Structures are given as C-alpha cells and as structure tokens.
Amino acid sequence: MAAASAGIAELLGRRTVEEIDREADVRSLITAFERTVVEVGAALRLPPARARELVHQADVLHTRLPAVAALLAAGEVDYPTVLLVIERTDLVAEQHMARLDAALAERIRTWARWSRKLVRDAVDGLVAEVDAAAIKRRRQAAFDERRVTVAAGLDGMAAVRARMSASQGAAMDARWSMLAKQVCPGDPRSLTQRRADVFDALNTGGAFGCGCGDPGCPCLVVVPPAAAQHDPPAAEPEPEPEPEALEPPGAEAPEAEPPAEAPAVEPVPAPPIPAPAPPGPVSVLGRQVVLHVIATADTVTGHGNTAGYLAGYGIIDAELVRELAREATRRLVEAPPFDPRQAVTYRPSAALARFIRARDLTCRFPGCEVPATCCDIDHTIAFDHHDPTAGGQTVPWNLACYCRTHHRHKTHDTGWNDRQLPDGTIIWTSPSGHQYRTRPAGVGLFPGLGRAQHRSEQQRITAARRRLNAHRDTSEHNSYRNQKARNEIRDRRWRNGFRCRYLLFTGDYAHHTPSKSPFARFVNDPLEPETLPPHWQPPPPRNNDTDEPPPF
C-alpha cells in the first residue's frame, strides 16, 4: 500500500506540473486532482468516490505526513493506523504539520496492538499539544453535522442513528444503562435488549417494565423521570461512595462497580430527559446521570488549553472542558502517598480508586476498550487475605482496571498471566507463551498520572532527604561561602581593570602623584590577586533580625 500511495502521489505531482502550463479556462474545468482521480479509478477499477479518497490520502502522506509515510514504507506501521492519523489531522494548520509529523513518527512505533480508540485518543492528544485550536475546529464542524436518521432494516427491524455532541451522547448512554439496570435478576432480557426498550419508553413516554413475569416483582413498573419542571430543586451533591470491595481470588467476580466512583476531575450532572409519567403507582428513578471528565487544573481554571478527556468518548477541547466544569463537582486526581496501612487493606481508598481509573482509562487487557468506569479494580499479584503482608499490596503499581470478561479470565484461566511494572505497564503472557504489553492510556494524555512512586523509590527518596537534612547547615555555609568568593573575585577584577585604565590615561603622573578622588581611593593601591587562597573565608553574614526595633 505504501508503494501504491507513493505512485499516486508522484502521478498527482506530474499532473500538477502539467496543469501550470495549461490555459486558465481549462484549469478551471478540470484540475490536476480530478485528472489523477480519473486515471487512478480506471487503473484500479474503483468508483470515483473511492478513487478520490485514495488520491487525497496519497497527497496528504506526501505533503503533510512524510515521516509517517516513511514508517509505512518501512513496515513499522499498518495502513489502518495511517488512515486514522490522516483523518484526525486534517484540520491542523499547515504551520504546525512539520512538528506534528515528527511527533507522530516518534511515538507511533509504541502503538502496536493498540485498539482503534486508543490510537485515536493518542493522535488527538498530540494534535491538542501542537495545535489546540484544531480540536475546537473539529468539534464545531462536527456539531454542524448533527442529525438523527431512521433507516429500514431486515426482518422487521429499523436502524436509528444519531449524531450529537459528546456530552449529550455520553449522558444518553449513561442514562439508558442506568434505567436498563433497574430490573430484578429474573429479567430474561440482555442489557442491550433492555437498553433498546428503555429508548422506546423514553421516546414514547411509556413505562419500562421488568420482564420477569412475577406479579409481585417490585420492579414491575419502572418509569422514566418526570419532566424537568416537576423536579425538586437540585440538592448538594452527595459525598462520593467508597469503591466496592474486590472479589477474593478463586471466587466469582463481583458485579461491575457503578460509575459513581470514577477517575473524573469533574463529574458533570447532565440535564434530565423529560418524559411524561403514567398515572398509578410507579417507581421513579434518579433524575441525574454523571459524566466523568479528566483535565488539568490549568485547563479548568482557564490558565491553560490542554485538551481534556470525557470518559466513554475520548479527547475534548479545553473550551468544552470549562463548559462542562462550570457547575460540576471537582475532585483532585493524583497518586496518593504510600501508606503502609492502606497497602495491607484489601479495599482501595476512594482517592486511590480514582487515580487507578484515571491512569488506565480502559480495561488493561490487550485490545479491550471497555471504559475504566465500567471495570473492576483488581490486584495484579493476588491479595493474601490470611496474611496481607505476604501477598500483593493495595498500591498503584499492583492495581489495574479489568472488564468483567477479562477479570474472569485473569482470575480463573490459569493460562493467562500478567506482570505489572512500576510505571503501570502490564506484560501479559498468553497460554501459547506470547507476550503483550499494555501501557496505561491516561499517562500518555496526562503525564502527571504516571508519577506514582514505588515503595522502593519512596524509601530511597526518604533516605536521601534524611541525609540532606543532616548536612543542611554545612551545605548552606558552603553555598554562602561560594557565592561570596565569586563576588570577591568579580570585585577584584573590576578594581584591577579600573587601575589599569587609570594608568593608561595618566601615565607616569599616576606613579608620582596619588589620586585624591574621594570616590576611588583604591586606584592608589597595587593590583590585587584574582585568585583566592584555599582557606579564604568571607565575613560572617549579618543578622537581619526582623524583630529589632528601627533606629528612631
């Protein structure tokens, strides 16, 4: 594919050169690009739309992404990844493309075996670093394309497709899942089927009932929230609950943790979707869903424009981050300091759970894209419930997010083994012996999330600080002495230079008649040595006591 792309780019270049020599009225009718499209379509037997895509991709690789094209030719990157890069960089300004191309060529080698979503988020993160305005331009252009379409399907079904803003889509997705889970365990429908029924109930204003068939089921009628104008005033947000306890090794994996505890800096309550409530006894559900946004403090406060991350969606621009954070609950996400008591406790603290979800963003199994908010937090080295000090500790470098499917495989399938490095990288070994590396996606977007200190590193830093504190007085004196020595040598050189200039302008007169100037008596002294003896010491520092009364 790289050779074909290079050939198409060369053909386009030739046709462009020929176009320059053509008459202006002919150039306005048939451009070099259109001529190349026709030739490529005929040679490859492609329809015009597909041929136009190939020519555009070849042109972009040749003119805007030459370093990425070189990696494609060398076989170091696959063509689907290149296509994704072309798509996500199309609105970047020309003056930023050289820097972006170099950054992509440097990092794209580390994206092997990444899912399409992770690659997309990584590319968007680089684009935000190089040209933050491009993310905003893409969002504005995409918002103008919002629409809802209904198409006839097969076997009496229909396909409903909607294109809307990221915050609206994430809110609807979370709301449908929340409503679909309000049934008893006896409901025979799958979660996806219940979500479809919830969508119909919200659209028609009808009720969503449990399908267990039990007349005494408390979930027999579950009604969507009433209209917004009937809602009571919003109360203060409830404190964030502690994360669910992790399932002991060998036991059945627990139900996925609810998305109430997530790595977001700003959980954003979305506006309710109104729907009329039918008469009679009903079970009214909560009126808010929670969106999780991760962003730097500078972006939230308006002092920076680093892109943010919307859980379940991906990269969003700084302006949208501030819009969502305007009235949101904000929580600090950082690696908590090492706590020996927390390390031997099975359940991670709320702050530690937030950090793990923000660091991982998705399930850590190779290729899995399940959001971290829907994953379990599990120990890489199993926690020893009988002797917590002997087993895997509850620390950042021994915790990771796993979806329910891969959590079960990790716990019960002895063929799969994982090993976590101090930086959060996980090395998976498959039953066939193959190894796969997965890196925490959040660290690539927010480098500050990769600063969790291993226990050995924390001990080394503590010992170094203790040694520095023991020698603090000596270090301060040496620093003071060195600074004064530099000042003394500088002053001597200045005085010697002044003496030499004085002799140059006055000649023999200076040897017989000393200067009587009250401002430069030192010119009468001999030249001073411009080096200090080894044991030279400055005068002791003055005691600047702020409590001393003024001289009046």
Image (cartoon, rainbow, N blue to C red):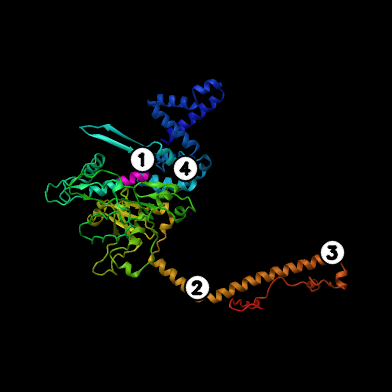
Marks 2 and 3 sit apart, C-alpha to C-alpha, by: 53 Å
Q: Of 120 and 350, which appears nearest the observer?
A: 350
Depth-wise, is mark 2 or mark 1 nearer the camera? 1
Q: Name the residue type under label 2.
A: Leu
Looking at the rendered structure, the kind of residue marked 4 is Ala
**Label disc, if present, on residue 468 of the rendered structure:** 2
Q: Amino acid at mark 3?
A: Phe
Residue at 79% over, 66% down:
500
Q: With 92 as the anchor, is 397 left or right in this view?
A: left
Q: Nearer the viewer, mark 2 or mark 4?
A: 4
| 62 in the magenta segment | no
Among the two numbered marks 2 and 3 on one chain, the one whose residue lies closer to the N terminus: 2
Q: Of tags 1 and 3, which is closer to the observer?
A: 1
- In this picture, residue 522 sits left or right of residue 85: right
Q: CA distance from mark 3 to mark 4?
A: 66 Å
Which stretch did the figure color magenta? Answer: 163-172
Mark with earlier residue (1, 3):
1
Image position, residue 66 (x, y; %): 49, 39
Report which residue position mark 3 lands on: 505
Give me the C-alpha separation between circle 2 and circle 4.
47 Å
Residue with the mark numbered 4: 134
Q: Position of residue 367 (x, y in %)?
A: 32, 47
Residue at the spot of label 1: 164
